[in-house]
Amino acid sequence: MKGLLIAGIVSLLAGTAAAMGLGGGFVLLVYLTALAGIPQMEAQWINLIFFLPIGGLALFWHGKNGLIEKKAVIPAVIFGLFGAAGGSFLARFLGDEVLTRIFAVFLGIVGVKELLQLRK
């Protein structure tokens, strides 16, 4: 029961951050892989499924508030689909262990960058 409560809280925080465009996927992926012990490939799948309703709801509200640049939507969707297809093939090719290491290095780089920007 405690695990479900923690998962619910993390999901709430991740959904809120994702809806604001602040990278809620990072929160969810870190929780799923580091704390829940889910393999990287499965955690990414869960994260993508999690994002569908969150993205749809955020899109609705941002559209209602006039915050969507309509000229950018079609190119972003087209190139995003190609990127998603290429990324999924690459993820399958690399496997869980390599993906976990790449994700860890990427998080480290982002963390160091953020720490260095705090000084400015």
Image (cartoon, rainbow, N blue to C red):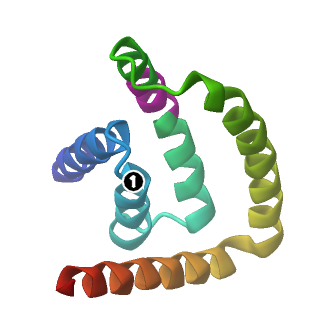
- Residue 92 rendering spot, x and y as whole percentages: 79, 63
Q: Residue at x 35, y 36 (%)?
A: 19
Looking at the image, residue 102 sits to the left or right of residue 61; the answer is right
Which residue is disc 1 drawn over? 23
Q: How many labels does the image show?
A: 1
Q: Residue at x 24, y 40 (%)?
A: 12
Q: Which residue is drawn at 76% across and 51% down?
A: 83
Nearer the observer, 120 or 49: 120
- Element marked by disc 1: loop
Question: Magenta span covers which residues?
Answer: 52-58
Nearer the observer, 58 or 93: 58
Q: Main secondary structure of the magenta part?
A: helix
Q: Is residue 22 magenta?
A: no
Q: Does the magenta stretch include residue 57?
A: yes
Q: Is residue 70 above or below residue 38?
A: above
Looking at the image, residue 96 sits to the left or right of residue 87; the answer is left
Label 1, residues with CA under 10 Å away: few <14, some 14-19, many ≥20: some
- Residue 62 rendering spot, x and y as whole percentages: 38, 23
| Residue sitting at the far top | 64
- Residue 26 rendering spot, x and y as whole percentages: 41, 60
Q: In which quarter of the image is the C terminus?
A: bottom left
Q: What residue type is labelled 1?
A: Gly
Nearer the observer, 56 or 114: 114
Q: Is residue 17 above or below residue 86?
A: above
Looking at the image, residue 19 sits to the left or right of residue 97; the answer is left
Looking at the image, residue 102 sits to the left or right of residue 25; the answer is right
Q: Residue at x 19, y 46 (%)?
A: 9
- Residue 64 rendering spot, x and y as whole percentages: 37, 12
Q: In this view, does 65 lie above or below 24?
A: above
